[in-house]
Each structure stands twice: as C-alpha cells, then as structure tokens.
Image (cartoon, helix red, strand yellow):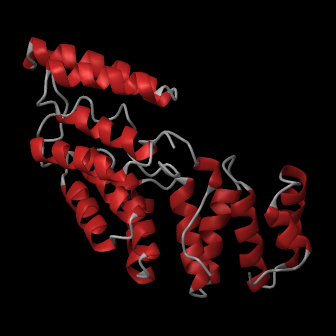
Amino acid sequence: MNAVLGFSLWRGACAGLAALALLGGLTGCATRGLDSDAAGGIVAPADESETRRRARTRLALAAGYFENGQTAVALGELKQVLQIDPSFGAAYNLGGLIYMSLGDLATAESQFQRAIALNARDGNALHNLGWLYCQQKRYDAAVQMFERAVANPLYPERAKTLMAQGICEARGGDRAKAEATLLRSYELDAGNPVTGFNLSQLLYMRGDYERARFYIRRLNNSELANAESLWLGIKVEHRLNNTEAMRQLGAQLRRRFPQSSELVAYERGRFDD
C-alpha cells in the first residue's frame, strides 16, 4: 500500500502553490515571504530602501499574476523586479515556484538556490527547494532543507514544512520518522486536513487502528472531509469491526461523492486495496 499520500481536496490550493502538486498544498504560497528580512522577521517600511519598496510592489504584482494562472505575464513582471533589485531573494523564490509549475525543475532549483544564497534563513525558499527535491526522490537532501527551514524560530510556516517533511519521509520509506514528524506538525496545526489524513493513514498501515480512528474521525466530522478521507475512515472502522460507523460513512460517501472510485471500492468490499 502506498503511504503517500494524497488529499485531493487540497490540490491546487494556495499554500505556496499554483499547482498538490505545487502540490497538495505543499509548496510555499507565492505571495508569502515577501515581507521577510534576513532573520525571517517582518520588515518595517521605514527600514527599506526606495529601491526595495519598488521591487516589492512589483513582486506582489508578479505573484498575483502567477496565482491567477497568467504565467507568462508573471515572468515578465519578475524580470522587471530583478532589474530594479537583483539582490531581492524573494523574487528568486517566486521564480522557482513559477518554473516548478512549468516543469522546468533545473531552472526552479537554481532559482531557489539563488534565493537561499541571498538569505540563508529564507524558510519559504528552503521549504520549496525541499519539496522540489522530494519530487525528484532526493529524500535526504529534501529533509535537510525542511529541517533548516524549521530550525528558524521566526519562520511562521513550521507546521506546513513539517507536514511536507513527513510526507517526504513516508515517500522515502521511513514511516516511523514520517509519523513522528507529522505528529509534530499536527501539534502545531491540528486543523490541517492533509496532516490529519496522512497521519491517520500511516497509523492505519502499521495496524494502530484506534489512533488512526482518532485522527480520521476528526477530519471526517469537519467540512473538509472528502472521498479519500471517508474511505480511509471506512477502512479503519472495518478493521475495528464497527459496522454501524462503516454504514454511516458509506452513506456519506454515496451521497456526497457518487462518482468516486472510493465508492466503487466500498461497494465491492475492497477494504484491503
């Protein structure tokens, strides 16, 4: 069974990301990190040069175009940003996200690396480079980037980065470490459905059905439940011989997601797939 790990509700959602892919909510939001200084804090307007303020304003435009799917326009704006201020690390981070969305991973990597060279504590760029490495199955390098991001106490997206790290560790086959990392992420942000789903799935896979039920029930009792989470909940309840809970979840799945592959699997009794 594959430990990794979808949650299609969040695919395409902005968490650094135009595309789960960029990624199931796993990359850094294009407009985030535009206010960070070298220490990862917030820059006061009075502390910035006029050049940096002009570049930041233009970068916000580029990020907006990117999030609206206007990639070519975003790249054009980004070139203008770097003409104004070639030392603006956040611009290279956005460039990395854009090229990552285009599938040009070599250029994306160089853009993220340039951002980090300009600001070694840029948690957004470290996170995004880590996720790029994870997509390339460079798991050790990915974890190093994630850990560097999380080590910065001023980095505000630690829960998201720990989530991405846990998913990457699971993809690399280290389920025990992945579970521990996802638990850390959950402690920081218990409302993240991607974290809750993947944590429950890892627990299910190692046979800890009671704990798996705790996390998946919390998700399925929220408005963020989807076909994947309901199906995982059904499989957990099946293992615990709770036929009434299975029936209730199955009814939800049939009512809300009648065209889903998960409903097909449920109706055919394919609980071990």
Residue 15, located in which quarter of the rendered image?
top left
Image spot of residue 93 (x, y percent): 27, 40
Q: Is residue 150 visible?
A: yes
Residue 140, located in which quarter of the rendered image?
bottom left
Against 24, residue 94 (above or below) is: above
Q: Tell me the quarter of the image containing the C terminus.
A: bottom right
Image spot of residue 164 (x, y percent): 41, 60
Residue 84, located in which quarter of the rendered image?
top left
Against 19, residue 66 (above or below) is: above
Looking at the image, which residue is at 36% across and 52% down? 105
Q: Is residue 155 visible?
A: no
Against 239, residue 101 (above or below) is: above
**Taking 105 as reference, is 214 left or right?**
right
**Taking 70 as reference, is 120 left or right?**
left
Looking at the image, which residue is at 40% across and 53% down? 160
Looking at the image, which residue is at 89% across and 69% down? 247
Image spot of residue 133 (x, y percent): 33, 62
Between residue 75 and residue 133, name the one nearer to us. Answer: 75
**Taking 110 as reference, is 23 left or right?**
right
Looking at the image, which residue is at 61% across and 88% down? 207
Image spot of residue 27 (x, y percent): 41, 48
Between residue 106 and residue 158, name the one nearer to us. Answer: 106
Between residue 76 and residue 264, name the one nearer to us. Answer: 76
